[in-house]
Image (tube, grey):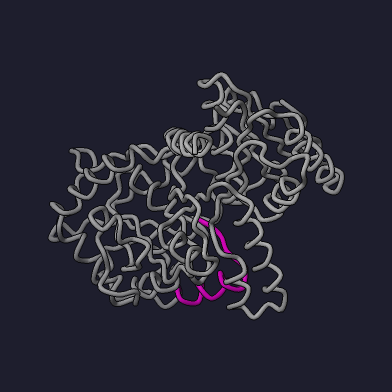
Amino acid sequence: MLDSIVYAKKLVLPTSKANSIQTLQMAAAFSDLADQEGIRLFFHPGLRIARNGLELKRYLAGLGIETGSAASWLPLGARQRGLYGLRFRFKVLTRLAAAKNPLFYTRDLGEAALIATARGLPFFRGRGIFLFEMHEILSKQRQAAEKKHWPGTRRQEQSILEAIDGLVVTNPVLAEETRQLFNYRKPVLVEPNCHSERVFRPVDLFSAEHPWPAADSGLRINLIYFGNIRESKGVGELLKAMRLLPERFHLTVIGRGYPEYMADLEELRRKIPDEENRVRFTGFVPQADLHKICSSAHISIIPQQKTGGFFSPLKLNESLALGLPVSATPLKIFEHVAGLTHTAPDCSAAGLAEAIAGLAANPGLAEELRRRGLSAVKQYTWGKRARRIFEFAQNLTAE
């Protein structure tokens, strides 16, 4: 039986990076699970702010994380990043040496390589269970971008996959690619990133106060996109689709991207009729404020253009948890949730516009998608994800 969880993820707080926020949500879920199991969690974030101070509590509250869920964390000072990195590695190796039967859980190559190398040494060999959470095949991305050092990344990924006891991936396509590219044959658990129940709760929709706007009513249809903004996410195609939609369709885009790409999107926005009233960019919004902004939305749009093995349906789960009908592109990654989304015929602007207009004109379908989504997303909370991962690791100890 596992007697502790070592969540080996190095990060410095506060941060607004999406992957770091996911890490904190997972750390909070692991902390609650450890309390339930009567075991210890070892998680060592770096702090640029006062330890256990009011500023940290406010930061966590903004992410929907209760202070109690973070009470067992063991933060390290991080005013000097290099020193924090050394102390972090020392703490992880100390746990590897001292723990009887720990679960080591990592999600970045650097930390995974550290544990893989240490567990290859005679003194550490066979200690505990080692899981790696993969969000992307980084060497594949670097190869596609013609980065000259991608073969070294490929070798590092191969060595990690050989050292781990089990793999956690955020989508089934990534599991398939890992088997094909690395000939990986060990156990795999597909676990998408989940949602915070405190932040992503159902908005009022299909009620007397917030009815679905009928086609002949002239009322606005409010579309929303939230998440990272880069070319592969398809925000550009969504803006082009807005040029094809009637003027009662309005769009709010929540998130931020590189200045160069945001400038391109601004250029696309200027080509939309009545764009000043119909399209709004909010920039970064704290998670705690998302529900308020989404409360007037009718449809959540996921215009993803490509995945390349890197896609975690986090925004899909968060949209479903908000109770918003979802219109998405027809990518393979969405095949297992086909009954939960309204799928565009293709990834083009015209295809998106057709799907959005079709869903808006079919309130019966929209309400059914809301019902299905709210039912399905109950299993996709951070706490339930942590429990499934822990049980996966427990089963590996029995093999």
Vertical arrangement, residue 40 with respect to residue 63, above or below: above
For this orientation, the residue located farthest to the bottom is 146
Where in the figure is residue 286, as x and y percent of width and height? 55, 44
Quarter of image, res 214: bottom left
376 sits to left or right of 199: left
Residue 262 is one of the magenta-drawn residues? yes
Where in the figure is residue 332, as x and y percent of width and height? 35, 66
Which one is nearer the viewer's eye here, 179 or 325?
179
Where in the figure is residue 276, as x and y percent of width and height? 43, 66
Query: Which residue appears at 17% of the width and 48% of the height?
Result: 368
Which one is nearer the viewer's eye here, 115 or 355?
115
Quarter of image, res 337: bottom left
242 sits to left or right of 70: left
Query: Which residue appears at 52% of the width and 60% of the height?
Result: 184
Where in the figure is residue 124, as x and y percent of width and height? 74, 40
Query: Which residue appears at 63% of the width and 62% of the height?
Result: 157
Which one is nearer the viewer's eye here, 278 or 283?
283
257 sits to left or right of 238: right
Which one is nearer the viewer's eye here, 333 or 354?
333
What main secondary structure does the magenta stretch of the protein show? helix
Vertical arrangement, residue 92 with respect to residue 177, above or below: above
Query: Which residue appears at 46% of the width and 34% of the height?
Result: 391
Instruction: Please state, as top left, top right, bottom left or bottom right, where the N terminus lies in the image.
Output: top right
Point out the stretch of residues depicted in magenta: 255-269
Q: How many marks can you see?
A: 0
Residue 52 is one of the magenta-drawn residues? no
Quarter of image, res 78: top right
